[in-house]
Structures are given as C-alpha cells and as structure tokens.
Amino acid sequence: MRGAGHAVCLGTDIDTDVIIAGRYLRTKDRSIWVAHVFEDLDPALAPRLSGAVIVAGKNFGCGSSREQAAIALKESGVIAVVAPSFARIFFRNAINIGLPLIEADPGCFDGTTVRFDLESGWVESGGKRSPVRPLSPRMLDILRAGGLVEYWKVKQ
Amino acid sequence: MSSLSERILGAVAGEYVDRKVDRAYVHDGTGVLTLEAWKRMGSRGLCDPSSLSVIFDHIVPANNSTTATLQHELREFATGSFLQFSDIGGGICHQCMSEGVVLPGEVVVGADSHSCTLGAFGAFATGVGATDMAAIWLTGETWFRVPESIGIHLDGTLNGAAEAKDVALSYVSRLGMDGGSYHALEFIGKGTRNLTMDERLVLCNLAVETGAKAGIFYADHVTTEYLARYGRSAGQQVQEPCEYVQELEIDLAGIEPLVAVPPRVDTVKPVHDLAGIPVDQVFVGTCTNGRYSDLARFARIVRGKKVAVRTIVVPASREVLAEAARTGVLADIISAGCTIGSPGCGPCLGAHMGVLGEGEVCLSTANRNFKNRMGIGGDIYLASVATAAATALEGEITEPGVP
C-alpha cells in the first residue's frame, strides 16, 4: 500500500474531542463531521486536509472512542496519518474504516510532499526516508480490504 | 507466571489472540454507528444477543428531534433483536454493567473508551470503536494484542479528605497521557484490600487517560461480597508473581486532594495551589464519580448549607438515584440548592444539558478536561467529590476539610 500527499503538521496528544467535538456527534450525516473537523484546534486546518498526509506528534487520537474522528479525517480527504504513536482505540478505528496510520517519526515540513509504502516499510518526509513500525498481518489485511466491513464481507 | 490480563486472555504479552467476548455493550452514541456498520456487513445475524447490551446514557432524554430519531431507530432494533436494553434514565453503561452484571475472569468489551472501568471486578475490560463492535455483534469475538502490564503497588489507607479520585489523578500525572499506552495497569499490593468496589471502579476508570488498554484488580472478598448483594456468585483470583514492565508505588496515606488543570488530565496540582480560582459551575457525576457513595459524601458536606454557584448533580444510574432518594441524600442535595439531572453522562462530553459558556469555568468530578469539551471557550478542572462540594459552597476552588 503506497500513497503520497502534502504534509500538514500537528502537535502531540491530539485528542478526538478536538478532531470532532461532542456537539457534532448526534447525526449520521458525514458532511457535518467534515464541516467541523479540527474546529476547536484550528479552523484553518479543514480546507487543507484534502490530499493531505497529517504528520503529528506522539499519542495521536487519544481520548474518546468516537469513530467519527477517524471518519471525519478520511471523508475530508486525508490520505494517511503519520505519528510516533497512536492511542489504541483510534488506531483500531482508523484501520477499521480504511484510513492508513503510519507509526514513524520522520519529522514534518509543512506543505512538502510525504510519500509512504507500507509493504516496504518506509515513509519519506523532507526528502528523507524513515522506517515504519509494521502493522500486524491482520491489520494490514483489514486495511488492504478497505476496512473491517469489507474484510468481513469477503470473509463470510 | 502471568499477569491477570495474560491469564484471562490465555496468552503471553505481545501475542495476538482471537477471544470470545463474554459481555459487549454500546451506548446511544456509538450504537448508531455500530448498527450502521453491522448492516453494511450484511445484517447476517447476531452471535449471542443475550451477551450484547444497548444502554442509552449519552444524551438522555434526547435533546432534539435528530437525536430522538437516531435513538428511536436503535431502540427498535435493540428490543426487536432481543438485545439487553436499558432506555433513558437507566444509567451510564459502565455503571449498569457494574451492578451485578460483569464477573471476574470475563472478557468485556464496550464501545466507549471508559469501558476499562469494569476491570475493577478482575475482568479484562477494554474499549473499542463502532466498527469493531459491529464485528463482535456478528461473530461474538474480537482480536487482542495481549498487553504488557504495569504494576501499581498500593500501600496503606486513604486518610484525611483524600479519595480514590485523587489517587487516580496522582497516577495519571505520574504516567502521563500516554505513559500507559497499550498496557494494562494492574493494581496490586496490601492497599487494595482497603479499597471498596466503588473506589476500585474509580481507579480503573482513569486507566485510559494514560492510554492504557485496561485497568485491573484481582477479585477478592470485597469483590465477591459486592456481587453477592446482586445474587451473583464468583470466585476470587489469587495473584501470581509476575514481571511488570514498569512499577509504580503509591502510599495511599500520602495522597492529598488534587486537581487536574485544563486542558490536560495529566497536569495535576494540589488543591491548595489553586485555591481561590472562581468557578461558574460545579458538576458531580459521570462514570468516574456518580455512584451512591459519591452522592452520599457530597450530601454530608453540603447538608444544611447553600451552594454559592450553579451545581449539577447527575446520579450514575437509576439504582443510585433510587438509593439516594430512599436514604435522604437526594433531599439534602436538593435543599442545598443543587440541580439534579436524569441518570446518564450529563454534561461531561458537552453534547447537551449543562454545557459551559464562553470564558466559564467548571469544577467537575469527570475524567476529561480537553479543550472545549464541555462547551466552546469553557475551562474544566477535574477533582474529587469532596473538593467539588467544598468548591460549590464557596464558589471558588476550595480545599476540602477533613471529614
């Protein structure tokens, strides 16, 4: 699984409340989550997410189990999220909806191109290649299927 | 020699296992997306409806017609498919599951991050998201990476005004917001014997605030006596010597009342360092501190007095509310000028009643103080029930007196 996008740099401990606030959860309308993604962190971020690879600090996605956080990023056009570590529920949620997460610490250069290849195990940021912590075989299968719904459709 | 998590999951730390889930539950927030994902998987049956619960707690009663419609759809499905269903006012999912449902040794999965609360019973309990839960509805099982364990040694007895909440804030501050990531926090040591089930539930509740997958106590006589009151019998669990990847020592007698300063749960200071900060609202409740023992403690402090700021008290369940009504605790709280909410999560996640206005400050007994969580531009300080009561009476952050 390969991909590329422009870097959007974020800090450490980005919690799911600031990805999508509790006040927007009571709906199944995904366009509402896209409209309000990162609103409480920085309203200027949302227009930059289409085609982006988010490169963040440690513990990305901590806090609430709300899957709407992962959905909001994917529906906004985020290609992948790169961080040295992820909170575990967010990690499962993102892979389960087919949003690639890349455990690596490549440094971030806002707006420059980030490339990655999960099978070969590298991510490239600022022209420098960094190793990626491999996904478990099961998670890679789920991601390749496009998410856990598609994985189970094929499996049963 | 194994940790309790390894024993329950039946494999050593680092291994991936598929495990049957003994109890799985969703609430009105995550249940909507779970149902949607389950339908997209093909609506091909529910593995064991008797082990699946749907518990309405996040926005109860519904705040607008969109919420009401989503709840209606989930309610119809839950009752029509013979899932265990708790409608509005029944209580917070974790609390309902702690009232004689979860047993030691079980694998428990909730579609809510604070599902780790139920490790207090010696169960392996953890949170997942909606799509993972949909697969559990379908297959009755899920995969786990068996976590390494961090040993938290408790010694001594709580004294003065300190509560289990202060112990929890203490370990969160020492480990940090990701210091327990992917690990189980195993609470051990002589001090555990001196903790009630309610106190153990508080300690396990905040495990996820360190990133931990689970918090867990060994079931002992306190556990079995608590479950016996619900007519449930359970065995005790004997600790084996095991290797922890990290160990933390906490002397319960040395714990003082603490506050987590916005916007991080791991920025923790003694109450007296923050004394005098004016607050606009006090909130007592949630899956952390909305149990009967919490309401009784709060009532003892405010009885016969009047609160100085708006104070919202939300019982964690109908059982808690009924007990508070029966014993007079509720009357004391109402007479002190507090507002009572319907059992559930209340304003904790900022989705309905009790949210903050721009620039307002709340002292809350909840477990998260993230930016804007309870309302745009509002600040949240997290503290114990006694600190909340003392603060409510003064209208500013106040150190609780020794009871």
Image (cartoon, rainbow, N blue to C red):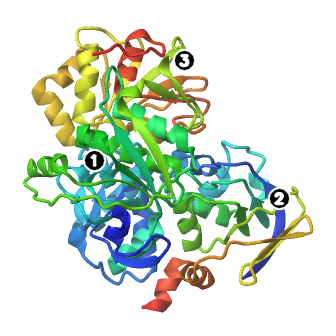
Up-down relation of residue B306 to residue B130 (above or below): above
Q: Position of residue A4 (x, y in %)?
A: 82, 73
Q: Position of residue B383 (x, y in %)?
A: 44, 28
Whichever of labels 1 and 3 marks the residue nearer the N terminus, that label is: 1
Residue at the (34%, 60%) spot, across then down: B241
Identify which residue, B63 or A78, lies in the foreground.
A78
Instruction: Tell me the chain of label 1.
Output: B
| Amino acid type at image mark 3 | Leu
Give the CA distance from mark 1 to mark 3. Answer: 31 Å
| Amino acid type at image mark 2 | Gly
Q: Residues within 10 Å of mark 1 (few under 14, many from 20)?
A: many
Q: Which residue is mark 3?
A: B274
Can residue B373 be seen here? The reply is: no
Nearer the camera: disc 1 or disc 3: 3
Up-down relation of residue B63 to residue A3 (above or below): above
Q: Residues within 10 Å of mark 2 (few under 14, many from 20)?
A: some
Identify which residue, B102 or B52, lies in the foreground.
B102
Q: Which mark is residue A107?
A: 2
Q: Secondary structure at mark 1?
A: helix
Residue at the (40%, 60%) spot, across then down: B126
Answer yes or no: are tags 3 and 2 on the same subunit: no
Q: Is residue B140 left or right of residue B152?
A: left
| Amino acid type at image mark 1 | Gln
Image quarter of residue B310: top left
Instruction: Tell me the chain of label 2.
Output: A
Q: Which residue is mark 1?
A: B95
Identify which residue, B169 or B319, lies in the foreground.
B169
Q: Is residue A124 left or right of residue B370?
A: right
Q: Which mark is residue A144?
A: none
Q: Is residue A144 left or right of residue A131?
A: left
Answer yes or no: are tags 1 and 3 on the same subunit: yes
Residue at the (70%, 60%) spot, across then down: A84
